[in-house]
Image (cartoon, rainbow, N blue to C red):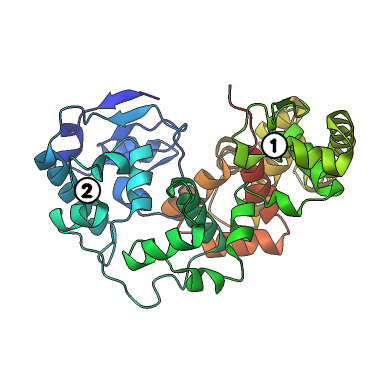
């Protein structure tokens, strides 16, 4: 994706910058930003681990076509100032932070920074911009399961061909670029279970019911289309995201049988999600301006989306925030779960642990984040 090129000069002016989460625009006027419902102070958003943009979210990319090392250093020093000004302590610059900033259109991609013709690796870059990373004991003590899962996925998809995940995790830990495998295991999850949370199951352990469940989630993500194979891989998905043809045939008897079992489980799953959504919808007020949600429920065809929006709206009610009826509906409707988390932290000072705890108490964490993540990674590429 090329995107709309953003000039770095737009970043360096002295006045504060605000980022509009819905569009990716940058705003300098604080009054204008205050009137944009999803605008946040730029530095605070860059260091917010609950904000997880993807490559497809925004159309902006920083114009680095003519950059040499001096331009990378100047930009890196600006980034250090930006994030440190948004925190009460020094913020370590990491590959995860740089990738988040890149997807926001305000930084160069990691592969460009660490290229052999520039800095060779990230530690050299950190030294050049005055951001040497120092390990601090306990720095990962407050990480959530989602943060560990995101980190393991990042290492998994970027590791060298043939490199073991354990080895890649340890190399990053030794370079002060992330938690060690021992720290990760203290979260209560293994590397493989964290990968499964991000859509990389261990298909070697699959049985017939697992295949049908996977097929049903795939259909939910793709408007009811059954999985189809091209060669030994599911059409439209990277090989690591889907069971191979051999696995499906082994456990279900053939592709046609797999598709039939998936369709049956899909119908059951839709009914289950609708039942959960109807349970939440019973508590919607019929007055006081609550019309946006009702209009959405009448027109939205996806049971997963209906449930997610109702779950977000319900969690907002339990948080007892000073929100008008319309504002609560807009936050529940217009934001994906990760933007939802970021806005609540930046605008209303609801830290992710508190948000997740309330969602868990209401048994809605999976309805908001878990199902959304599973569906996102299984949407077919066009």
Query: Neighbour class for label 2 at 10 Å: few (<14), some, many (≥20)?
Result: some
Q: Is residue 220 left or right of residue 318?
A: right
Residue, x 46% and y 73% (percent of image)?
A: 141
Residue, x 37% and y 61% (percent of image)?
A: 172
Judge depth for marks 1 and 2 and give the one in front. 2
92 vs 103: above or below: below
Distance (Cα) linking label 1 and label 2: 44 Å
225 vs 26: above or below: above
Q: Which residue is mark 1?
A: 305
Which is more toward the observer, 245 or 9?
Answer: 245
Provide residue 34's location: percent of width, then percent of height: 36, 41
Provide residue 187's location: percent of width, then percent of height: 56, 70
Which is more toward the observer, 17 or 60?
Answer: 60
Q: Are marks 1 and 2 in contact (CB under 8 Å)?
A: no
Q: Is residue 156 left or right of residue 204?
A: left
Provide residue 200's location: percent of width, then percent of height: 62, 48
199 vs 36: above or below: below
Q: Secondary structure at mark 1?
A: helix
- Quarter of the picture containing the N terminus is top left
Query: Neighbour class for label 1 at 10 Å: few (<14), some, many (≥20)?
Result: many
Residue 356: name its quadrant.
bottom right
Which is more toward the observer, 69 or 187?
Answer: 69
Q: Residue 120 got which mark?
A: 2
The answer to which of marks 1 and 2 sits earlier in the sequence is 2
Q: Is residue 178 visible?
A: no
Q: Secondary structure at mark 2?
A: loop
Which is more toward the observer, 136 or 90?
Answer: 136
Instruction: Name the residue furthest left.
Output: 70
């Amino acid at each position: 994706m090329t995107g709309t090129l953003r000039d770095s000069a737009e970043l360096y002016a002295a006045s504060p910058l605000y980022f509009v989460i819905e569009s990716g625009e940058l705003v300098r006027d604080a009054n204008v930003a205050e009137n944009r419902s999803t605008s946040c102070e730029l530095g605070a958003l860059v260091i917010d681990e609950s904000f997880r943009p993807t490559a497809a979210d925004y159309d902006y990319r920083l114009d680095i076509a003519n950059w040499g090392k001096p331009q990378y250093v100047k930009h890196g020093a600006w980034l250090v100032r930006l994030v440190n000004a948004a925190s009460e302590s020094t913020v370590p610059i990491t590959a995860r932070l740089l990738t988040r900033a890149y997807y926001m259109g305000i930084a160069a991609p990691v592969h460009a920074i660490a290229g052999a013709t520039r800095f060779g690796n990230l530690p050299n870059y950190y030294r050049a911009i005055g951001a040497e990373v120092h390990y601090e004991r306990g720095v990962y003590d407050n990480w959530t399961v989602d943060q560990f899962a995101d980190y393991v996925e990042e290492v998994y998809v970027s590791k060298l061909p043939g490199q073991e995940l354990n080895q890649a995790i340890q190399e990053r830990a030794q370079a002060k670029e992330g938690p060690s495998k021992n720290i990760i295991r203290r979260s209560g999850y293994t590397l493989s279970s964290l990968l499964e949370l991000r859509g990389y199951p261990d298909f070697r352990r699959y049985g017939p019911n697992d295949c049908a469940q996977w097929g049903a989630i795939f259909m939910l993500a793709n408007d009811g289309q059954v999985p189809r194979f091209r060669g030994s891989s599911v059409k439209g998905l990277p090989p690591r995201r889907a069971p191979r043809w051999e696995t499906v045939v082994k456990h279900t008897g053939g592709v046609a049988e797999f598709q039939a079992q998936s369709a049956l489980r899909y119908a059951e799953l839709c009914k289950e999600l609708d039942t959960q959504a109807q349970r939440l919808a019973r508590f919607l007020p019929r007055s006081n301006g609550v019309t946006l949600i009702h209009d959405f429920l009448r027109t939205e065809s996806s049971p997963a989306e209906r449930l997610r929006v109702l779950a977000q709206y319900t969690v907002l009610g339990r948080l007892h925030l000073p929100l008008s009826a319309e504002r609560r509906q807009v936050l529940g409707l217009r934001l994906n779960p990760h933007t939802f988390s970021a806005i609540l932290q930046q605008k209303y000072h609801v830290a992710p642990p508190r948000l997740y705890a309330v969602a868990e108490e209401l048994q809605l964490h999976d309805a908001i984040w878990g199902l959304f993540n599973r569906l996102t990674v299984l949407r077919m590429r066009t």
